[in-house]
């Protein structure tokens, strides 16, 4: 595989593998996040349904309590009460109102449904005992032939406050079903399960009419028994996989549920997967194009140098390479071109020297013959001098060996002393640096202590301000509650006024809604303020603990600083003593080196003299034979010069 293809493959793999890993991780992470987001959105919708239901119940209870507190009702003047309830019935046509006595008899109703005795009904008994608000379970009204919920509140004596009757209002499940139906679209289904585990409200009215029992469903059984919110992932063979969130209402004991098909999540994940796949392909395409041009820029100069090297191998030194890049490959090409130029110059020099060598070898042959005669005469004179010089050389050799060994020992001691001195100096510097670091740490701990103390004061002040805001929110909540009650009273009075008070009733209703919204917002703010105060108290305690720990750390670091100072003093004294020892040993080493040098000079002179005498003796004896060999070698050299000329002639320069 060529260099270009290798570079292209490596760059694509380096880009492809991280992209695939990143895509897989991103899809998995975002799928989990989408599932969480869907669950949270479903829970918010379920809470919204619960708020709507409770708002409707609040509105009904306020109207019921207003009716129960009306003097006409408390008078138990049945004809007047009948007229009054008929007027109220027109204002609230979806509700039915009835007044019960303390014996369980419905004495008067606002509609035409016959009265009955409800003494045995549990909700009646609770109201008779003085419970201010009572919500019955779902019951089937034989008179209206539909399922209803009874809202009950006691009628109290104006003077004694005792229970003198029960004001009863029944509401149908139609209104509650409207709340869940409005949120049920695009596969999303909202429904309400009562405390008995049966369907109370559902977009499919047949399920409501049949009062389907859902106690066999796991999450419904768990939510009702444990009285808590939650969610579940269900596998339905017919409807497929779906996400269910449920909210438990403590007031009614109902479970508000919301189902969403899991395909909502998978559809978002599929779209995300397609986008990531397209992005990955685009990136790989861009990387491939870039890799192609990068690989090309790397491989072209190398191919040019390969071609030039092949031509040089064939003896052609006339070729040149031209690469203008300034990177490493450009520098390699420049060096290669310089090598070719130097090789061309070298071949030219070798060709010239080969001619000169051939001529010089012929002259050397004749000179060698003359030198052989002179060498024989000198050999006899030198032999006698060589014998005396050899004895003197052996004695000086033994003396020199002893002195050199002593000098080496002293030199080694000097080197060891220098090493100890250098390590002592480094130890002093390191200890001083550690001392400075400890001092810096002490200063930093003091700064941290000051900062933590200041932060604790600021957080404490924040807690006080939160308490003041909480008091203001309580005041706002009280005002909103009073406004709500006044608006309801005004609505009742407007109902009594008939057609003339209808416009005023609309205004009173809007005022009441604003008061309810203000009261709800005030509750949320009070809850948030409570959480802020709790977290502020925790922060103050944590900062106080941090201040104590910082003070303890400062004391410990101060003790470390004192210990470092003592270590510095001891190491400084040790370094001074080691320095004195090192100076003495260095002086001794210097003197021993001088002695060794002097003895070595004498030994060298003697050795040189002996060697020269012996060499001269041997050389003169062999010179004659050597000269003969030189003559024959000169002839061989001439032949080699000719061969060299033939070899370099192959190169074209």
Image (tube, rainbow, N blue to C red):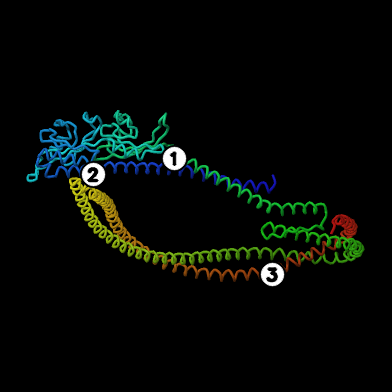
Which residue is painted at 40% across and 44% down in the image?
Answer: 37
Q: Nearer the viewer, residue 366 or 240?
A: 240
Q: Nearer the viewer, residue 399 or 473?
A: 473
Quarter of the image for residue 452 reads: bottom left
Mark 3 or 2 closer to N-term? 2
Taking 341 as reference, is 5 left or right?
left
For mark 2, does the 10 Å Cα neighbourhood hold few (<14), some (14 to 19), or many (20 or more) residues? some
The numbered dot on residue 265 is 1
Q: Disc 3 vs disc 2: which is toward the camera?
A: 2
Image position, residue 495 (x, y; %): 20, 45
Q: Which of 285 and 447 is in front in this view?
A: 285
For mark 1, does the 10 Å Cα neighbourhood hold few (<14), some (14 to 19), or many (20 or more) residues? many
Image position, residue 293 (x, y; %): 66, 52
Seen as rendered, the residue at the extreme front is: 499
Image position, residue 40 (x, y; %): 37, 43
Residue at mark 2: 59
Which residue is painted at 50% across and 69% down in the image?
Answer: 579
Which residue is painted at 62% across and 69% down in the image?
Answer: 593
Q: What element carries label 1?
A: helix
In this picture, is 559 found above or below 259? Answer: below
Mark 2 or 1 closer to N-term? 2
Distance, label 3 to label 2, CA atoms, is 124 Å
């Amino acid at each position: 595989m060529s260099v270009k293809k290798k570079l292209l493959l490596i760059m694509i793999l380096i880009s492809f593998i991280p992209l695939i890993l990143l895509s897989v991780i991103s899809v998995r992470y975002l799928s989990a996040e989408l599932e969480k987001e869907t669950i949270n959105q479903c829970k918010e919708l379920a809470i919204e349904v619960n708020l709507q239901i409770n708002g409707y119940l609040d509105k009904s209870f306020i109207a019921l309590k207003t009716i129960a507190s009306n003097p006409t009702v408390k008078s138990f003047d049945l004809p007047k009460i009948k007229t009054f309830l008929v007027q109220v019935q027109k204002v609230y046509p979806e509700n039915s109102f009835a007044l019960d006595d303390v014996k369980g008899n419905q004495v008067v109703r606002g509609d035409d449904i016959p009265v009955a005795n409800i003494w045995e009904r549990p909700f009646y008994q609770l109201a008779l005992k003085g419970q201010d608000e009572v919500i019955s379970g779902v019951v089937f009204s034989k008179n209206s032939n539909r399922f209803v919920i009874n809202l009950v509140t006691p009628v109290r004596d104006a003077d004694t406050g005792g229970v003198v009757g029960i004001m009863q209002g029944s509401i149908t499940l139609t209104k509650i079903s409207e709340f869940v139906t409005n949120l049920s679209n695009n596969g999303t289904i909202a429904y309400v399960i009562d405390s008995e585990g049966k369907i109370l409200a559902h977009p499919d009215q047949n399920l409501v009419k049949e009062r389907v029992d859902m106690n066999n469903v796991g999450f419904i059984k768990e939510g009702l028994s444990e009285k808590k919110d939650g969610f579940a992932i269900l596998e339905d063979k017919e409807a497929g996989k779906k996400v269910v969130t449920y909210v438990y209402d403590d007031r009614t004991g109902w479970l508000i549920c919301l189902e969403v098909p899991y395909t909502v999540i998978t559809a978002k994940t599929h779209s995300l997967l397609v986008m990531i796949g397209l992005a990955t392909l685009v990136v790989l395409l861009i990387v491939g194009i870039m890799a192609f041009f990068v690989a090309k820029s790397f491989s072209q100069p190398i191919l040019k140098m390969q071609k030039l090297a092949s031509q040089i191998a064939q003896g052609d030194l006339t070729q040149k390479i031209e690469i203008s890049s300034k990177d490493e490959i450009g520098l390699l090409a420049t060096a290669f071109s310089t090598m070719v130029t130097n090789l061309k110059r070298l071949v030219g020099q070798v060709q010239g020297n080969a001619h000169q060598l051939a001529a010089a070898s012929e002259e050397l042959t004749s000179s060698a013959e003359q030198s052989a005669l002179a060498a024989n005469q000198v050999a006899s004179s030198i032999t006698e001098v060589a014998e005396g010089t050899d004895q003197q050389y052996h004695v000086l050799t033994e003396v020199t060996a002893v002195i050199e060994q002593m000098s080496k020992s002293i030199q080694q001691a000097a080197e060891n002393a220098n090493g100890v001195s250098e390590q002592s100096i480094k130890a002093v510097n390191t200890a001083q640096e550690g001392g400075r670091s400890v001092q810096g740490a002490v200063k930093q701990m003091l700064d941290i202590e000051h900062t933590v103390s200041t932060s604790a004061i600021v957080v404490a002040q924040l807690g006080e301000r939160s308490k003041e805001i909480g008091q203001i929110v309580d005041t706002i909540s009280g005002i909103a509650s009073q406004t709500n009650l006044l608006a309801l009273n005004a609505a009742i009075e407007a109902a009594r006024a008939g057609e003339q008070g209808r416009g005023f009733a609309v205004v009173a209703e809007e005022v009441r809604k604003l008061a309810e919204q203000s009261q709800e917002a005030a509750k949320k703010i009070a809850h948030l303020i409570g959480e802020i105060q709790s977290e502020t108290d925790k922060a103050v305690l944590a900062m106080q603990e941090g201040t104590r720990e910082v003070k303890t750390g400062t004391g410990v670091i101060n003790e470390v600083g004192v210990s470092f100072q003592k270590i510095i003093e001891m190491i400084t004294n040790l370094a001074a003593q080691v320095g004195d020892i090192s100076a003495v040993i260095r002086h001794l080493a210097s003197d021993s080196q001088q002695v060794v040098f002097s003895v070595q000079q004498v030994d060298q002179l003697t050795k040189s003299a002996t060697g020269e005498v012996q060499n001269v003796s041997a050389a003169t004896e062999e010179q004659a034979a050597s000269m003969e060999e030189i003559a024959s070698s000169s002839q061989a050299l001439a032949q080699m010069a000719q061969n060299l000329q033939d070899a370099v002639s192959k190169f074209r320069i």
